[in-house]
Amino acid sequence: MNNFFDAIVIGVGCMGSSTCYYLAERGYKVLGIEQFSISHEFGSHTGQSRIIRKAYFENSSYVPLLNRAYENWKALEEETNEQIYFPTGLVYFGPFNHPLLEGVKQSAKLYDIKLDQLDLSDGARRFSQFKLPGSFEILFEPDAGFVTPENAIRLYAREAERKGAHIHRNEKVVSWKKDGEGIQVITDKNIYRSERL
């Protein structure tokens, strides 16, 4: 059946487009359904850039995922000959012993992430646009930078299609339900079935 897929992905944004890509790469028959165009301004990853960093202060357990994300951006760049990740470095500053800065240092130490500790004169010279109090600590993560999310979404969707995925744009999912051993997805244009959603 043309309307049966191994997997259906609802929403072809940052997560959905890459999911379609990796499923298609593994040989699955996949359908991605996006209610808008690719990309669009209604998603969480709209805009020209999103910061990326490894010394994740929120929780060090995210760092292995971030390392993998860096690898995936590099692989996508190599496959498409387009730059997605732009290494700019990232400066952190704030009061000594601040929980955010302590989290940055903890992640850097646990996962051997390059992190420069600058003294006030180095910080003032390198980041002269800021007037930092003498009581501030200054950290610089050279491998941090930004990614271009809308371009990444477009590239992942394009490459997913190149690998055999079906991507439907401007098609809205109305409902979905369990249907025997699989899933039924109803859109404003059709009915699809899949093993996984």
Image (spheres, grey):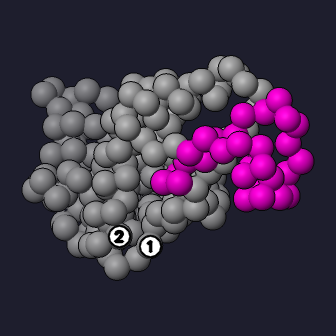
Residue 3 location, x and y as percent?
Answer: 20, 54
- Amino acid type, label 2: Glu
- Amino acid type, label 1: Gln
- Residue 83's disc number: 1
In this view, 82 is above or below 26: below
Q: Residues within 10 Å of mark 1 (few under 14, many from 20)?
A: some
* Mark 1, secondary structure of its residue: loop
In this view, 106 is above or below 84: above
Say if the magenta span includes residue 32: no
- Quadrant where the C terminus sits is top left
In the picture as drawn, the residue positioned furthest to the bottom comes out as: 81
Which of the pair 84/99 is nearer the observer? Answer: 99
- Residue 149's disc number: none
Residue 125 in sight here: yes
Residue 69 location, x and y as percent?
Answer: 37, 48
Q: Quadrant of residue 7?
A: top left
Say if the magenta span includes residue 118: yes
In this view, 38 is above or below 144: below
Residue picked out by circle 2: 77
What's drawn in magenta, residue-wise? 116-144
Q: Is residue 114 left or right of residue 69?
A: right
Discs 1, 2 touching: Cβ within 8 Å: yes
For the residues marked 1 and 2, what is the alpha-carbon distance in whole angstroms? Answer: 5 Å
